[in-house]
Image (spheres, helix red, strand yellow):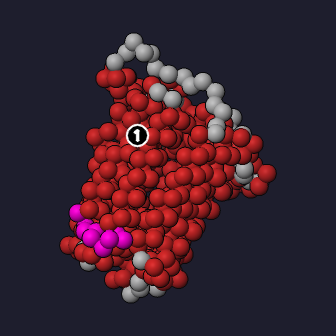
Amino acid sequence: MKFDPAAEDSLAQQAKFWQLLSRLRREFSFKHTFSSLRHRNYRLWFWGQMISLFGTWMQVTAQGFLVYELTRSSAYLGYVGFAAGLPSWLLMPLGGVVADRMRRRDLLLITQTSMMGLALCLTGLTFLKVVQPWHIIGLAFLLGSANAFDAPARHAFVPDMVGREDLTNAIALNSTIFNSATVAGPAAAGVTYALLGPGWCFLINALSFSAVIAALVVMNLRPEAKSSPDSSPWQDLKEGFAYVLSHPMIRALIGLVAMISVFGVSFVVLIPAWAVEILHGNATTNGWLYSARGAGALLGALIIASLGKFSFRGMLLSLGTLAFPVLLLGFGVARSLPLSLLLILANGVTAIVIFNLANALVQTLVRDELRGRVMAIYSLTFFGFMPVGALWIGTQAERLGEPAAVLINGFVMMAFSALILVFLPRLRRLN
């Protein structure tokens, strides 16, 4: 019989796939799902964030639909997303330096209080019926500025609450918080918007910040590792970038997150236009689409949390990277609401698997004294590149239509996933 190397390689790949599924079945257990909640500080954070993020997603959903009602422009949805993310490029690296120099709880108290104030401003403008698109862009920019300091501190704060032993689980539970809110928040926003108007969505968000602020105040925390007080902020900043650039796997993981942010999840900014123009719906349809994606992301986060301290994170991350563009292309051609909801739900599962595992692997590999700066760079790839993607897909949708813009992104992500599979075999071996 003639030897066929291609056939043998295909069989080997199939064997690895079935081996991965077998390991997933063995490792999966609901007893692991909420292990981080045994830490008191994390319990406080969990419930405070749950309430706060519910309000945040009510505002995100209502704000997007309000912008579309005011402008009837897909491009304007991209402009708002770009304005929210631009401060990430300007301020987030500095936010990482600050997170390594001052107490992270104190920094989070400042940022969360600032975000509450901005939500109250939007509430007032809306109730007074004077809100304009440029108001929303300006407030989105200011909110992005607060987030530029909040995100690095929030990511680096997780090990302060749970230690390294429950780090992956806590990161996954953070995603369950976020995505539980994306299930309930948009649906509640759709109903509230339809019955009472967008102002009430913004007011609920403003009030919800009090929960996480109260949780931060009552925590008992251990001392944090800090950078040398003799170094300048500029030296600290250069040290963080040099560390990321010199570490091959951290560099690769952050690059993967950047690509997903630009060409993957950026399609979410088109959901208000998609609900109206493609699915012929209204504010309630908009809320259902956001909620379905949130439900998928919640499911993905619960799967990761339930795997406990598993040792095949790189392989699972690679599998998610391959599945993501297939689901995105499917969503781009779907025209019925039930199928669109199913595909966007599955897309949410794969997106959260990618982001959770990339975050956990970076946090596992980084040195403690550089955690704030490295997580600032990681956050920059998400919060900084996503608005670039929003601007890109918003302008493409304006010129070519929403379906064409989503399909273009899907094909780009398909090509990138193939490159990851071929040229980054080490990623699959990360534990």
Residue at 53% from the left image edge and 74% from the top image edge: 187
Pick the front one: 334 or 65: 65
User: Which amino acid type corresponds to the residue marked 1 in the rendered image?
Assistant: Phe
Under circle 1, the secondary element is: helix
Say which residue label 1 marks.
149
Percent coordinates x, y for residue 259 in the rendering: 37, 51
Q: Residue at x 36, y 64 (%)?
A: 124
Apparent side of residue 272 relative to residue 36 in the rendered image (left or right) = left
Q: Is residue 185 magenta?
A: no
Q: Which residues are magenta?
A: 126-134
In the image, farthest residue toward the top: 230
Q: Is residue 342 left or right of residue 422?
A: right
Q: Residue furthest right?
A: 31
Q: How many marks?
A: 1
Q: Is residue 28 above or below residue 373?
A: below
* 407 displayed left or right of 29: left
Q: Where is residue 279 shown, x and y percent of the image?
A: 40, 84
Residue located at (64% from left, 27% from top): 222
Residue 6 in sight here: no
